[in-house]
Structures are given as structure tokens and as C-alpha cells.
Image: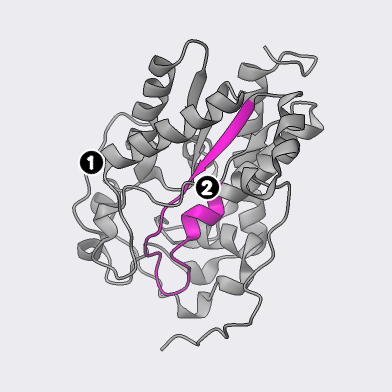
């Protein structure tokens, strides 16, 4: 049985910059004088094995946006971070208790209404960044609907998994197929929320190559390929809720992974939303 956490314990400390939820109204008004670009992190509440919290995808999404905002500020390209959209399309994880899944329709509607609210407040450029690749299809539909519903808004979906998948083999210890809740994802949460990670509870569990190919491979759309396979049940794939070997995870590996992600995201955002002087395009 997992060790209980005391009600008065500090679970973790969150670094800045703040999201909109931690800013005041005047803070937002001041930020809008310098930029109308907002990063929107998309998370999920779903099982990642006994060694990771169900909010792993939310934590990753927020940290990716946080680090990207810090990098862009250094490049004189200021952005604002929206609160994490915490629920995603996680139907294939419902075999594990605690998972919360919403329909694609609900996620699209929620995203559109969040963006239109921010649009009324002055934001015009919406950058969707995921922590759960199962949200990507809904994010793309929502981006188009935001553009369709406005006269001058821009919405873009950035899938950093393509860039990271190209170098995974150079930064991970494992030589086998790592995926959901495996070495890489565990390593990234070790960087930001080590108090919530329990690698000793993780059990190495790898899928056969022909099975893993349909979950994560160069052929899969989420990693830059041209094929998408619908997933019925992760419980049928893995009895533990994760795929890979979380016991190999190191914070250094997580840092290297974040560096690749942030390098790619910041370069695209700077190119598409700011000119060479750091002014809005």
C-alpha cells in the first residue's frame, strides 16, 4: 500500500513565472502592453503507474510552458501562460482508478470558450502546448474553431514530441521501447516534482515491438509519422499503467529532455510571433 501523505505536508514548490491564475488584473493589463501571446498548457488526469501522480501530464505541460516563457523572455519575446486545462481525452486509461476523461467535443468546446474569453480581454495569439498527446486531435480542431470565430486571432498547436523523439535514444539509458510513464516521462517529473515520484514502485514493463509500434514509433502521427492507431484500453496493454522502465529515470535525463523541448518550442514561437527585434509580427 502506498505511503500516506500527511494533510499538512508541503507536496511540492512551484517555480515562476506565474500563470494567469496567479496574476492580478493589473498584472495582466501590464503584460498585454508588451505581448498578446498566451501559451495554453493542456494536461490530463490519468494513471501513469504506481510511481507517478495522475496529474503528471498537467505538471509536464505547465513546466514546459514555464521554461519556454523564461527562454522567450531572455530573447525579448514576452508571453503569458494560461492556467493548465487539467482534463483531457483519456478514455483508454479509464481501466485504471482515478482517471478522468472528457470527450473530444467537450475539450474542443472548453478550449474555444477559454480562448474567446481571453480574446475579449486582449489576447490575440494562442499557442496550444500539450502534456498529453491524446489531446492533439482535439487541440487542432479547437485551434481552427478559434480562428473561425474571430477576425484576427491566431491559434497554433505545437507538438514537441516530434523533436524529442528524434533524440530520445541519445539521452535515455534504456535501449528498449520507452513510452507512457517510462524512463523519459519519469525523469521529467523527477526534475520538477521529485517529492511525488517513487521509482522504487515502478516495475520494468516493455511491450513487444509490433505492439509498441502502434503506441509510439516513428510511424505514429504523434512522433512525426503518417499513421494513427486508435487505442481501446491501456489496461489490456499493461497491467501496471506504464510502459518502459521508470527505475532508470534520472533528473539529468529529464533536464536534457526539457532542453530539447524548450529549444524547439521557443524557436518556433519566436519565428512565428515575433520579428528579429523581439517585436510582435
Q: Quadrant of residue 67?
A: top right
Q: Residue at x 63, y 82 (%)?
A: 8
Coordinates of residue 198 in the picture (x, y in percent):
53, 76
Checking the image for residue 229, the label placed there is 1
Q: Give the quarter of the figure containing the C terminus.
A: top right
> Mark 1 packing: few (<14 Cα in 10 Å), some, or many (20+)?
few
Residue 24 percent location from the top left of the image: 71, 44
Which is more toward the observer, 166 or 82? 82
Horizontal side of 253 relative to 75 (left or right) equals left
Residue 199, numbered circle: none
Q: How crowded is mark 2: few (under 14 residues within 10 Å), some or many (20 or more)?
A: many
Q: Which residue shows up at 52% across the image and 18% down it? A: 154
What range is drawn magenta here? 37-61
Quarter in which the N terminus is drawn:
bottom left
Residue at the disc numbered 2: 84
Q: Please, is residue 105 above or below residue 196 in the view?
A: above
Is residue 158 in sight in this rendering? no
Task: Tell me residue 220's x, y (percent).
Answer: 33, 37
Amino acid at each position: 500500500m502506498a505511503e500516506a501523505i500527511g494533510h499538512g505536508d508541503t507536496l511540492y514548490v512551484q517555480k515562476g513565472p506565474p500563470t494567469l491564475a496567479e496574476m492580478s488584473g493589473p498584472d495582466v493589463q501590464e503584460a498585454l502592453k508588451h505581448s498578446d501571446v498566451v501559451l495554453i498548457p493542456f494536461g490530463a488526469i490519468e494513471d501513469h503507474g504506481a510511481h507517478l501522480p495522475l496529474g503528471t501530464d498537467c505538471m509536464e505541460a505547465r513546466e514546459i510552458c514555464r521554461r519556454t516563457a523564461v527562454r522567450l523572455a531572455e530573447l525579448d519575446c514576452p508571453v503569458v501562460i494560461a492556467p493548465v486545462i487539467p482534463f483531457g481525452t483519456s478514455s483508454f486509461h479509464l481501466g485504471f482508478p482515478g482517471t478522468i476523461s472528457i470527450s473530444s467535443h467537450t475539450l474542443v468546446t472548453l478550449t474555444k470558450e477559454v480562448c474567446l474569453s481571453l480574446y475579449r480581454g486582449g489576447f490575440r495569439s494562442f499557442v496550444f502546448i500539450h502534456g498529453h498527446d491524446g489531446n492533439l486531435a482535439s487541440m487542432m480542431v479547437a485551434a481552427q474553431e478559434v480562428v473561425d470565430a474571430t477576425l484576427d486571432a491566431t491559434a497554433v498547436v505545437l507538438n514537441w514530441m516530434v523533436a524529442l523523439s528524434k533524440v530520445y535514444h541519445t539521452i535515455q539509458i534504456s535501449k528498449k521501447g520507452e513510452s507512457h510513464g517510462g524512463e523519459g516521462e519519469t525523469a521529467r517529473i523527477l526534475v520538477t516534482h521529485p517529492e511525488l515520484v517513487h521509482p522504487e514502485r515502478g516495475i520494468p514493463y516493455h511491450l513487444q515491438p509490433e505492439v509498441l509500434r502502434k503506441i509510439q514509433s516513428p510511424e505514429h502521427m504523434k512522433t512525426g509519422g503518417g499513421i494513427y492507431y486508435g487505442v481501446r484500453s491501456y489496461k489490456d496493454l499493461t497491467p501496471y499503467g506504464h510502459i518502459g522502465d521508470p527505475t532508470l529515470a534520472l533528473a539529468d535525463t529529464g533536464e536534457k529532455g526539457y532542453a530539447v523541448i524548450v529549444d524547439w518550442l521557443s524557436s518556433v514561437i519566436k519565428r512565428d510571433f515575433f520579428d528579429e527585434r523581439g517585436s510582435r509580427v
